[in-house]
Amino acid sequence: MERPPSQLENVRPNASGIKPPSRLPAMMSNGSRNTLLETSQSDLNARNGFNNGSMGPPPSMNGSIKHRIPGLPESVPKRKTLAERAGEPINPSRSHIQPPSKTTLPRGGSYYGHSRRASAVSAIASSNGMRPISRQRPSTAEEEDEDAGVTGKRKGTPVMSFNHTTLRKTRTHEDLRTGMRNTSAGAESSSSGGTSRSASGGSTSSDEGSVAQNHNISITSAFAELSLTPNHHRPSLERISEEVSPSKIPKFSTTPSLRHAHSSLALQTPSPMKHKSSINGLHTPRTSARPKDETPFFLTKDSLTPVKSAWDTKGRLEGMEAMYTQLRTQFASAADSKDALEESLALYKSRVQELTDLNREITTANRNMTGDIERARTDLHTTTTDLRQARRDHERDLLDIERKHDKELSDRTQKLEKQAESLIRERERDTERYRREAEETKQKWNRQKDDEAFEMSTAHFDELENLRKKYDGEKAALQRQLEELQHAGESRATESASEVEEMRSTIAGLQNQIEATNATVTSLRARIVSEDSRNTALELEKAALVSKTHFLEGNQEAQSHEFTTMRQQLQDAISSKEGTLVTLRKEEMMRRKLNATILELRGNIRVFVRLRPLLAGEEDPAKVDYPDVDSLDGGKEMVVHAPMTFSATGKERNEKHNYGFDRVFSPATANGQVFDDCRDLIQSVIDGYNVSILSYGQTGSGKTYGMSGPNGIIPSAIAMLLAEMHRLDEKGWQYNVAASFVEVYNETINDLLGDAKTWDEGDDLSGSVRGKRKEKHEIHHDPISGKTTVTNLSSVSLWPPPENDGQWPPAAKITGETNTESYTEKAVNQLLDTAAKNRRVAATKSNERSSRSHSIFVLTLRGRCEATGESSEGVLNLVDLAGSERLKQSGAEGNRAKETAAINKSLSSLGDVIAALGNKKGDESHIPYRNSKLTYLLQSSLGGTAANGKSSRTLMLLHLSPLQAHWQESRSSLLFGSKVHGTHIGAAKKK
Ligand SMILES: Nc1ncnc2c1ncn2[C@@H]1O[C@H](COP(=O)(O)OP(=O)(O)OP(=O)(O)O)[C@@H](O)[C@H]1O
């Protein structure tokens, strides 16, 4: 069947994608082209009416077309094609149709009117994170069902189907679909002759979405993704009509350009060209706006083709007119949409501008901050580098100093060790030499003494033998005389016995007579008694006669000679005794000399070190070794392990320090053992030397314990001196012992045996203290006698006991004691108690006073030997020094600062004096005794030789704490001790 030429064939723009309706007949004829049929039930019905029986139109139809579209031009050629009209501006204000922006598609809104704009604004607000103010129409279950229904319904539809996956991507697509459905429904109602709801519904606010959707359908149909079915090639229109059910939604054909437009919209990418092409390629479904009697037309794949017979040109034109109208409406709506989009765009632009400004500001700020950070980083880097460099330099310096120090130390140590070794060797040699000399002298003297004794004893023996012989002779003569007398007495006794016999016989005769008379018996008994008495008297007479005989028979001359001899012997014995005493004195002198020699050899300044044991509760002792503890003459070395430290390079350091002293006592050593090693020194006080024993060390190291504790130096020294004095008494030496006890506190001297209330604390307060006048004590040193005296100082006589026993101590009189030793003992105890009490009273002004003051117990021994006329005077100073650790304390205030300064001064002066004594080159050398009260007080007893030639000896008793924590204090004490030990002072001289 031939298809008549169509006007639309000429107006179809190729680029628009709208297929000219002229293609439809071809499709209908053989179905070789893809054809999309869109229809509704009413269309079908209408078509059925047309097509029923024949393809030709009813005669009445030819004129009715013209009549129904009065606006159409009469002449078909004069009519503008659809494409031309589409190109015309519909409204000057809407001449530029812009595609919808991707962000202006409102959800559930319309592209038209206020609601559309509101939706657009809402979309902007939503995109800016604000709550949209326009009403949004949610997707309802019904719609979902409808969607499903559409799909389901179209499943079996051979003509077209929707891609729901794509449609569901956005709300816009839902709306589009809804619009499509409405359109479809409109078509249905139109075909069924019902009232067109959608035609008037566009202005109904209650169904604004529906109206918008109805309007949208033209666009959405263009954007909907459609697919062609293979049935497009059906040969006839009837067949198409059959297949399109009225209940089915309109079918659309789509072209690649439409698909592209849809996908662009779905992706919401604005593209004017795409939109335009979409609009141009739009195949509008027939809407309910079409008059009921209007010829239905199909929207096929390639063109808007009214379903008319080929000969029904008018019908087809009407369809096209309707489509044209529809397109105009669509263009109008597109223009509205454009306005809305422009508005949105303007909003967006302003917002974008704002954001751009903000971004710029932030970028600028960020850039500034980045610059600052960069600068700060650079500064930091520079500082870090500088710091590292400085640290490296510092570490290098430290290492250098350390190396230098170590080297210096090792050099000095080696040097000192060499010196010490040579000194020790020299000393050993000297000792050995002196020992040999002493031994020889002693042996010589012993031999001499033995010879003398032998000679004396031989003479004595001879004399004794003679005397014994003489005595034996005399004794024999006397024995003989005695025997003679005894014989005479016995003969007299025999005579008496015969007389007794006679008398007895007489008695017996008489007894016979007694029997005769009792009176005779009684007289006889009386006679016997008288005879016994007579006999006794005779015995006595006999003894008297014997002695008289012995006396009378003795040689008076011999007797007087014997007496003379005996007197001579007695005289000899006395003179022998005198000789022995002289010898003993000589011996004593020799002993003193030897003792002095030994002490000189040992040095006038000696250092003993003593480590006290750990006390209860104390932990972490320092490790100390005593390498020669088992040596016969006592240990002299110690190795102290310093606490572990780390070098600048982080290396572990376990230092050991070797020390050598005159004597080293381990913690196990008791006070008595320490004193045994001090004996010879104290003995020398009796011999007339001045001796100082100084207890040095930090607080709590045992100074006071060693000095005044049980069997400490003070009580032991007094006991020893008393025993020595008794011994020397036998040798003709008599001694006086006096004691004083002073304290040096804050460079002021206080009398510990006086009254603490009168003490001068050196606090510049004049006048009285507690109502008592302050006592000032001045030190005087006599350069000629070498004696040091302190004014106003109490002195207690310990030996001999004072005549007026009980005058001292004042607090507790010692009375009723006849035993002098007991007095001394008690006096010493009383003396120590008084000192302690006075210190306690003073301590109320300054706590821990005992640790911050020096106490000096002074014993003065004056001796005289009447036999020899010798005399001696020695002073023993037993000094308990203040805690040495105060040297390092700083930051003290008030009294403490004063105490610290005073302790510093006195202890450093002590070191200076000892060092100066060691360096002394002659009598002219200056020794800084006056630098402190302590050294000035001890001037005559500090190991030097005074101007008067009197010299002295010093023993430094170094006390150490056993705790590792006190290592630094112990080390400084050991260094001080080593310095003193290394000082060699010339021989001490007795005055
Ligand atoms: N060898 C020792 N054996 C037993 N205990 C000791 C010994 N040495 C010291 N102590 C004890 O250690 C404590 C401190 O001793 P001490 O008071 O003698 O020290 P210090 O150095 O004299 O103190 P301060 O600074 O007060 O003069 C005392 O309790 C003492 O009994």
Image: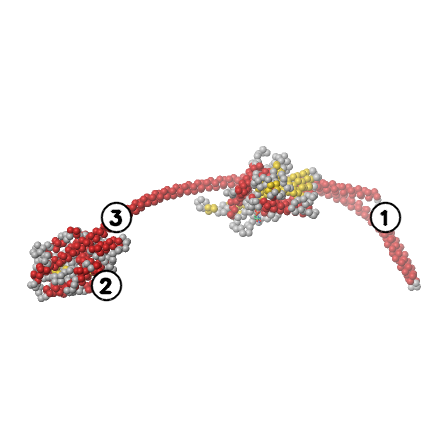
Quarter of the C terminus within the rendering:
top right
Residue sitting nearer the eye, 193 or 718 = 193
For the residue with label 2, is its CB less than 8 Å from the closest atom of ligand 1? no
Q: Which residue is mark 3?
A: 353
- Tally the marks: 3
Q: Is the residue 909 above or below the residue 227 in the image?
A: above
- Mark drawn on residue 142: 2
Q: Quadrant of residue 850?
A: top right
Q: Secondary structure at mark 1?
A: helix
Q: Which residue is mark 1?
A: 548
Q: Is the residue 145 above or below the residue 744 in the image?
A: below
Residue sitting nearer the eye, 975 or 351 = 351
Q: Which of marks 3 and 1 precedes in the sequence? A: 3
Q: Is residue 16 left or right of residue 986?
A: left
Q: Residues within 10 Å of mark 3 (few under 14, many from 20)?
A: few
Do the residues bearing badges 3 and 2 touch, measured as CB atoms within 8 Å?
A: no
Q: Secondary structure at mark 3?
A: helix
